[in-house]
Image: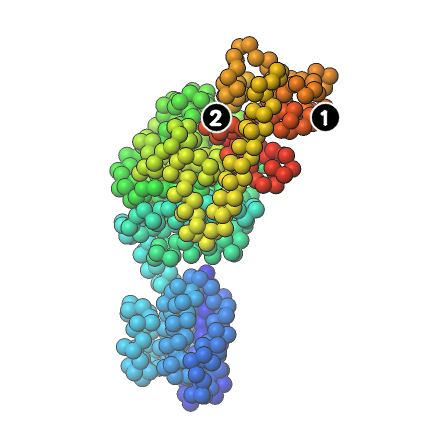
């Protein structure tokens, strides 16, 4: 946010007013304000278009949320001033502050300008006498601080406003679309006013910043950007690996938002298909955090580090993708950032990082929410066709795809199209079509190879869930089929009557290269389980057209 102050140049009929404006502009410059200068001239021959262009040049450096102090009179008349007010409001989103440098002008114009400026009387400064530099400096400082304080109080003191935070590390510029889509889904399902807090580092570019602001402010909600230097996390930047450092920003919320008592933190990969206000209304006054039990953990399909170390009971371990935080209670608990970082230093094998640490630190100060507040989309896909329900759907370890039988994916896709990143939705649609086409082609080729023929089938890779589904799909006996976790080159048979069913993960993802090195061809001598299986059976979620042409496999498209 920048602060501008106007200043007039050229011929003026009131030298006293001009000198006073020059003095305030000079003092403002000393305080770090930017000057918005213009010449006093005869504008009577300017039509609307010419005057608009003239003003566009004057305010060309203005950005969203910038504050402008206009010293009146400008010397260029009411038409000039009214259009200047309008453009400042359109560009910055804020009504300008007015320094009335002429008592006579104030009495003539203030009632006419009320629609353009704040109706707070503190914004009207009627300077009757000349002022010293020190006095003018104090006036300007108090003036700007007062408006900032009032704007902050509008956010903090209104109990009807819901505060929602996201962590953002966007090294390739493709992460903001998912935060923007989650924001869009929240806005479309509530009538409450929202203040979005974007916790980000220097990877947030100006274009995505504008798009995020557009999503928030289109329906009258607010957005605040909080920038961090990731070096505060030390060597965790290098350790976190496949997780984004952006998730760590949430541990700083109690410190960076000292006037806010509670906030809802959300992951970026969520589709909110219910009113977030219902969560906000829940009483968590006796707890530090409220969250949903972690689906893989409570279903015994995973054991996070603090559960394995008996630091947290399995049934109490929560998923931090939807986290309702009582910031007041967290502050009483201690310096949360220090507690989390200390835990991670003392427990370097904590694989889920801040989620593990949050569970360990708050295991006795957390309350569990019902599953509908953080419902994994994989649960939907495993049940076949499903209508969208009143839930928050979590695309954890997966992504949006339109080739599976559920309404949730389609609604999520439609929501993306209503954001400034609509092209990402079209990209997803193309990838979904390519995935369907590729799966159908793989199944056709596989059936052509084995049906009615005496073909020997060899399964290659770990006999995991995906491989077992491939065995069952081919109607074979799991205990009697030929299956290898490891193959040496001399063991690979390259004949027309032998087919390998290989997992993309075989031998730490080197198995496919071994088969190709032995001269086998995809779709003839070997088939990849994840390409002909449905996602609910362990198949790939999406596969790009480029990957189909090159017969390559990207593990980023695999369901883990």
**Image point (47%, 67%), residue name:** 62
- The quarter of the displayed image where residue 182 is located: top left
**Element class at badge 2:** helix
Identify which residue is drawn at 50% across, 68% down: 61
**Label 1: element kind:** loop
Q: Which residue is mark 1?
A: 519
Residue lying furthest front: 452
Q: Is residue 455 visible?
A: yes
Nearest to viewer (mark 2 / mark 1): 1
Residue 467 appears in which quarter of the rendering? top right
Q: CA distance from mark 2 to mark 1?
A: 29 Å
Rendered position, 244 above or below 417: above
Q: Nearer the viewer, residue 25 or 422?
A: 422
Name the one closer to the observer, 233 or 405: 405
- Picture coordinates of residue 35, whole percent (x, y): 49, 72
Q: Position of residue 499 (x, y in %)?
A: 63, 21
Corner quadrant of residue 483: top right
Residue under numbered circle 2: 537
* Residue at far top of view: 480
Q: Position of residue 307 (x, y in %)?
A: 43, 22
């Amino acid at each position: 946010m920048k602060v501008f102050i106007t200043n007039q140049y050229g011929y003026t009929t009131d030298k006293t007013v001009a000198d006073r404006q020059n003095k305030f502009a000079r003092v403002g410059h000393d305080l770090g304000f930017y000057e918005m200068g213009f010449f006093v001239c005869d504008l009577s021959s300017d039509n609307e278009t010419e005057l608009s262009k003239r003003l566009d040049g004057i305010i060309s450096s203005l950005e969203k949320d910038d504050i402008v102090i206009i010293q009146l009179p400008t010397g260029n008349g009411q038409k000039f001033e009214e259009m200047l007010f309008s453009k400042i409001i359109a560009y910055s989103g804020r009504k300008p502050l007015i320094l009335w440098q002429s008592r006579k002008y104030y009495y003539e114009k203030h009632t006419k300008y009320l629609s353009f400026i704040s109706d707070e009387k503190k914004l009207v400064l009627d300077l009757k006498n000349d002022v010293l530099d020190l006095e003018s400096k104090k006036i300007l400082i108090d003036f700007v601080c007062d408006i900032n304080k009032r704007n902050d109080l509008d956010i903090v003191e209104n109990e009807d406003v819901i505060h929602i935070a996201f962590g953002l590390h966007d090294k390739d510029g493709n992460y903001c679309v998912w935060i923007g889509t989650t924001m869009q889904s929240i806005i479309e399902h509530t009538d409450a006013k929202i203040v979005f807090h974007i916790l980000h580092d220097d990877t947030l570019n100006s274009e995505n910043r504008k798009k995020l602001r557009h999503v928030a402010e289109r329906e009258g909600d607010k957005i605040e950007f909080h920038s961090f230097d990731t070096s505060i996390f030390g060597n965790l930047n290098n350790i976190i690996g496949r997780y984004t450092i952006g998730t760590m920003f949430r541990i700083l919320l109690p410190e960076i938002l000292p006037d806010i008592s509670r906030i809802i933190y959300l992951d970026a990969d969520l589709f909110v298909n219910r009113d977030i206000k219902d969560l906000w209304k829940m009483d968590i006054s006796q707890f530090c955090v409220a969250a949903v039990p972690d689906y893989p953990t409570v279903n015994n399909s995973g054991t996070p580090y603090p559960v394995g170390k008996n630091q947290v009971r399995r049934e109490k371990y929560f998923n931090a993708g939807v986290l309702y935080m009582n910031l007041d209670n967290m502050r009483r608990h201690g310096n949360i950032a220090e507690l989390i970082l200390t835990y991670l230093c003392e427990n370097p094998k904590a694989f889920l990082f801040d989620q593990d640490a949050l569970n360990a630190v708050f295991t006795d100060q957390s309350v569990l929410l019902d599953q509908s507040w953080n419902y994994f989309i994989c649960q939907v896909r495993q049940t076949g066709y499903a209508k969208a329900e009143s839930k928050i759907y979590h695309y954890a370890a997966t992504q949006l795809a339109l080739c599976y039988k559920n309404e949730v994916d389609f609604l999520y896709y439609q929501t993306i199209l209503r954001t400034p990143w609509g092209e990402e939705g079209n990209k997803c649609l193309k990838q979904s079509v390519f995935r369907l086409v590729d799966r159908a082609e793989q199944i056709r080729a596989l059936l052509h190879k084995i049906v009615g023929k005496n073909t020997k089938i060899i399964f290659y890779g770990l006999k995991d869930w995906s491989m077992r589904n491939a065995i069952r799909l081919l109607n074979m006996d799991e205990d009697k089929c030929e299956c290898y976790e490891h193959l040496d080159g001399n063991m690979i048979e390259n004949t027309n009557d032998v087919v390998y069913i290989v997992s993309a993960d075989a031998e730490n993802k080197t198995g496919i290269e071994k088969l190709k090195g032995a001269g086998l061809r995809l779709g003839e001598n070997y088939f990849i389980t994840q390409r002909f299986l449905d996602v609910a059976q362990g198949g790939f979620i999406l596969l790009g057209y480029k990957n189909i042409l090159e017969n390559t496999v990207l593990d980023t498209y695999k369901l883990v």
